[in-house]
Image (cartoon, rainbow, N blue to C red):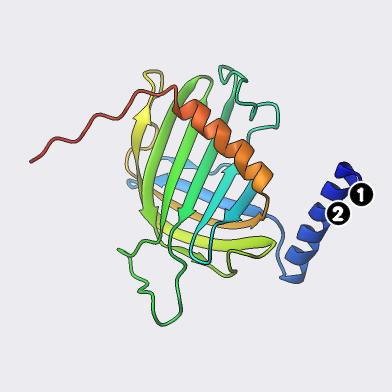
Amino acid sequence: MPPARSARLAAVLVALVALIQGCTIGSDVQLRSTDGQSILEPQMTVLAYVGADKNTANIFLTDLSRGELDTLASIEQVNGYIIHIHMFLAPKAGKTPIAETATNATVRFMVIAEGAVGIYEGAGFLLPTTSTDRPAFIASMEDAPLRLILANDRFADPLGNSLLKLSIVAPLDAAVVTRVSAKFGAILSTLPAAEPELEP
């Protein structure tokens, strides 16, 4: 089967699975400052995930175009976002505590504004409704605390300490994960290293 036809068939199968499950591929993302004065609500157009084992998954979301995701493409005229969620423990009913302080996933939220870049990072409780070996990964997160940890000198922090709320339906697609992850890494490599926290 030609690669293009195979890719189209895979996309149709993922869409059918999502429809059968009563949902469509997409996301609802909100990052708001803890004082409620500033809110980011990006419309993510690219979503994908890979599962390493039953507990581990990496999910990427972005609104960058295919051309903008080229690792050699400049971000000087780019405005957009890349989110990386790493789930390291799949919750089990009756065995995993679900509390405000519980965490089973880390989050990195990259903001790009015409060459200015900032990365907010934190952790929260990701609640999946599918396992990590399905054609689509469905999950939600409520009020995960994030803070700015890395930025270049052109970035003006619009949020400060923030809370992330999201729901996602991401297709299983290792190729897309690799592409978005590579762009994230390429941009990350241009940022100054974080200063170590001083011992009290």
Left or right, 116 with respect to 172, comes to: left
Residue 192: quarter of image:
top left
Task: Give me the disc on residue 9.
Answer: 2
Left or right, 124 with respect to 17, comes to: left
Which residue is at the front of the view, 10 or 138? 10
Q: Residues within 10 Å of mark 2 (few under 14, many from 20)?
A: few
Left or right, 25 with respect to 105, comes to: right
Q: Is residue 119 above or below residue 25?
A: above
CA gap between label 2 and label 1 equals 10 Å
Q: Is residue 176 above or below residue 183?
A: below
Task: Give me the disc on residue 1.
Answer: 1
The amino acid type found where label 2 is placed reads Leu
* Residue in the image at 59% along x and 18% along y: 74
In this figure, what is the number of numbered marks?
2
Residue 130: quarter of image:
bottom right
Which residue is at the front of the view, 7 or 125? 7
Q: Position of residue 64 (x, y in %)?
A: 63, 33
The answer to whether the residue labelled 2 contacts the one labelled 1, judged by CB atoms less than 8 Å apart, is: yes
Label 2 or label 1, whichever comes before in sequence order: 1
Q: Is residue 39 above or below residue 186?
A: below
Q: Position of residue 120 (x, y in %)?
A: 39, 39
* Residue in the image at 63% along x and 64% along y: 133
* Residue in the image at 60% along x and 25% along y: 71
The amino acid type found where label 1 is placed reads Met
- The secondary structure type at the circle numbered 1 is loop
Q: Position of residue 78 (x, y in %)?
A: 59, 23
